[in-house]
Amino acid sequence: MSVQVLISTMNESDPIKLLEKMNISSDAVIVNQCGYEKEEIFYIKNHKITYLCCNETGLSRSRNKAISYSNDNDIALLADDDLVYVDNYSELIKKAFDENPDYDIIRFKVEGINKEFKSYGKKSKRLGYLTSLKTSSVEIAFRPQKIKNANIKFNEQFGAGSVYRMGEENIFLFECLRKGLKIKYVPIKIADLYIGESSWFNGFNSKYFFDRGAVFGALSNRWALILIFQFALRHYKKYKSEMTLLNAIKEMIRGYKDYRRNLGEK
């Protein structure tokens, strides 16, 4: 069992320099959304690098393509091009999965370089529907064979470059839980992250709440309205200078209905 890093990037002209910048020391799949099609395999220090240039856009499409090229018997690690991995990340990840054979997905710690990324708990714990909501894609490693056998993919209507610009990892993890896969958090740092300007967050405006409502609609039709109301109340202090509570709820409900009407699943 090895670790394979699945990297999503755009308009990358030098994949070798990217791997050096990210401190990659394992096998990797690079999906470069750059406007043309190309497939290449090369090796760096006996590590296999699959380099895929493609004409499609959207982060979830990139994730799905990378997963489709992942090795079933390895551990896959989702990555963006603004990460820098610790020197022994591969050993840390393999050890965590060896020590947790009953778990299919493990969430690790990623720290911000220029500012705080997240605060993490000090103890390992199993994650469920609510506790998985704070998970980001770049914290996730998983057993590809389990994902593929369950026919789980990222919803391509969500994520940067898609119709709804957020929430793709939450929807992905909810689907994993629905299909019986087990998720665990372990307090082990695997990477640092450069935190720059968001490609999708432009403040707590109508589009933000519209997309958030669509995410809740994709997570659960039954519980969507409860999720909307709790989110509006719990985060009110963050957005109250930009949006009223009532308008935030209205926009989320509008996004929820839009998703269920046009793209929703039964």
Image (spheres, rainbow, N blue to C red):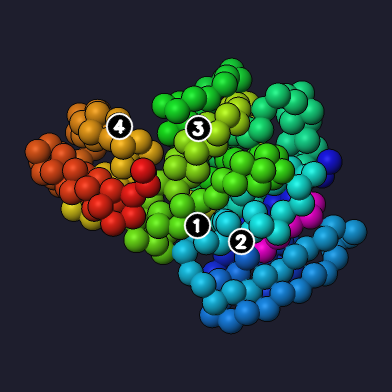
Q: Which amino acid does label 1 sit on?
A: Ser
Could you tell me residue 78's position as x and y percent? 61, 49
Quarter containing the C terminus: top left
Q: Residue at x 28, y 48 (%)?
A: 260
**Cα–Cα gap, marks 2 and 4:** 31 Å
Residue drawn at x 25%, y 52% is 261
Considering only vertical position in the picture, is 236 above or below 203?
A: above
Sequence-wise, which precedes: disc 2 or disc 4?
2
State yes or no: residue 254 in magenta: no
Query: Farthest right residue?
Result: 46
Residue 231 vertical position relative to residue 38 in the rendered view, above or below: above
Front position among marks 2 and 4: 4
Local crowd size for mark 4, using a 10 Å CA cut-off: few (<14), some (14–19), many (≥20):
few
Identify the amino acid type marked 4.
Arg
Residue 146 visible (yes or no): yes
Q: Which of marks 4 and 1 is nearer the N terminus?
A: 1
CA gap, disc 2 and disc 3: 22 Å
Q: How many marks?
A: 4
Check whether the beta carbons of the residues at disc 2 and disc 3 lie within 8 A of each other: no
Of the pair 193 and 220, the residue shown nearer to us: 220
Q: Name the residue under label 2.
A: 65
Residue bearing the label numbered 1: 60
Which numbered disc, 2 or 3, marks the residue that appears first in the sequence? Answer: 2
Q: Name the residue under label 3.
A: 178
User: In the drawing, does residue 198 fall left or right of residue 234?
Assistant: right
* Distance (Cα) linking label 4 and label 3: 14 Å
Q: What stretch is highlighted in magenta?
A: 24-30
x then y, percent, for residue 258: 24, 53
Q: Check disc 3 and give the amino acid type.
A: Arg
Q: Is residue 122 left or right of residue 261?
A: right
Element assignment for label 1: helix
**Mark 1 and mark 2: span between their CA atoms?**
9 Å
